[in-house]
Image (cartoon, rainbow, N blue to C red):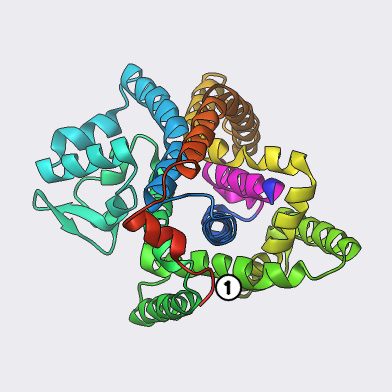
Amino acid sequence: MGLLRTLLALSVVFNHAAPAENMLVGGPIAVQCFYLISGFLISYILVERRSYASIWAFYVNRYIRLYPIYFVVALLSLTAILTTHLTGFAAVYAAAPTSAIVLLVFANAFLFGMDWIMFCAVINNKLVFSTNFLDSEIPLYQGQIIRPAWTLGVELTFYLVAPFILPRRKLIWLLLIASVALRILFLHLGFGARDPWSYRFFPTELALFLVGALAHQVLLPAYRKFSSRGQVLAANFATGFLIVTFITYAMIPLEEISKRLLLYGAVGCLVPLTFLFQQKHRFDGWIGDLSYPIYICHALVMWVCMYILGHFRIQDERVLGVASAILSVALAMSLNRAVARPFETVRNKFRSRERSGTKPSGARAIFQDVPARD
């Protein structure tokens, strides 16, 4: 699972740096596979491990997991923007109405709302809801310090509702059906396959999170019934199969929609086995820990690479993609060592304090007493 997550992060890097090269699975598919894997992992944390003594503890730990690295990269990115006088970023804040500036500042500062920006536009100097963010008189997305961070807004929304959904199997199925039905409706109305509705709208993306949760709650127990040797063989095969599929995805001779649906189905069915693989191989978890910092820092790295390559008049997308990927991995390792590791200690201490506290009451008690199965 760890190597798969890092391959997905690198897919986004290559998609942004060298979109014409069709390397790995591409950005949108990688993002949606991340949603599915996230659903699996959060279900494992909340339903099986019961890692947190309260909803509040879960929220705080999730934020500590995401925010420190985001803050450091955002600070570096903002410094780069201001020192190079990037005109697009400054122009947004100079021309946008107050309501749009408030939304941008809030989203950049707290991550919540990053995805909302993609459904907003400025029309007649007013911030309004829009089905196409490109219709805006002002490109609001250029006011994001880290543009790919919109996916964190989607993730945080899922974290917000996950404690109330994932312990209730019937509710998972109900919301899964509703989410799929909503996507079908949007497709029927003609805008469901168009950005931003294709993979940025949380109510329709919720289906992918829930498929991941069901993979944990239904498939993982079934796979654990295999013999020890059977688990090892199945986990090795599933991990290898998905790695090869991610790498060769562009070469698979199928229609894109069919290929994409088959990939999502394969990830949903096999992600529990890749999780078992990660449990038996510590190196896989270490590689997986690079995925988030790679994803969040790659826009900054790519900008630096473009500046350097431009100085030498090198305009080859493949060179930009490879250079961005290598440097993103290097920066991700540094971020994990300097930022994530110290805050992981804080998270562990926080969890320990929560578990050793007095008997919970109110919302804490409700959270602990929710049954793992309906």
Residue bearing the label numbered 1 = 257
Image x and y of residue 184, in percent: 42, 80
Could you say which quadrant of the image residue 41 lies in?
Answer: bottom right
Image x and y of residue 190, in percent: 36, 77
Q: Is residue 9 left or right of residue 170?
A: right
* Total numbered labels: 1
Q: Give the residues drawn in magenta, as a range.
A: 3-24
| Magenta run includes residue 122 | no
Image x and y of residue 295, in percent: 53, 40
Taking the view exactly as shown, the residue that stands out farthest to the top is: 83
- Residue 199 visible to the viewer: no
Magenta span: helix, strand or loop, mainly? helix
Q: Nearer the viewer, residue 70 or 220?
A: 220
Q: Residues within 10 Å of mark 1 (few under 14, many from 20)?
A: few
Q: Nearer the viewer, residue 5 or 321?
A: 5
Q: Where 83 sits versus 135, above or below? A: above
**Which residue occupies 36% across, 76% down?**
186
**Which residue occupies 68% across, 46% down?**
2
Q: Is residue 278 left or right of residue 57?
A: right
Give the amino acid at mark 1: Ile
Could you say which quadrant of the image residue 312 lies in?
Answer: top right
| Magenta run includes residue 6 | yes
Q: Is residue 232 left or right of residue 140?
A: right
Image x and y of residue 78, in percent: 35, 25
- Residue 207 visible to the viewer: yes
Q: Where 351 sits versus 207, above or below? A: above
Disc 1 on helix, strand or loop? helix
Q: Nearer the viewer, residue 338 or 31?
A: 338
Q: Where 5 sits versus 322, above or below? A: below
Q: Nearer the viewer, residue 72 or 20?
A: 72
**Which residue occupies 54% across, 32% down?**
344
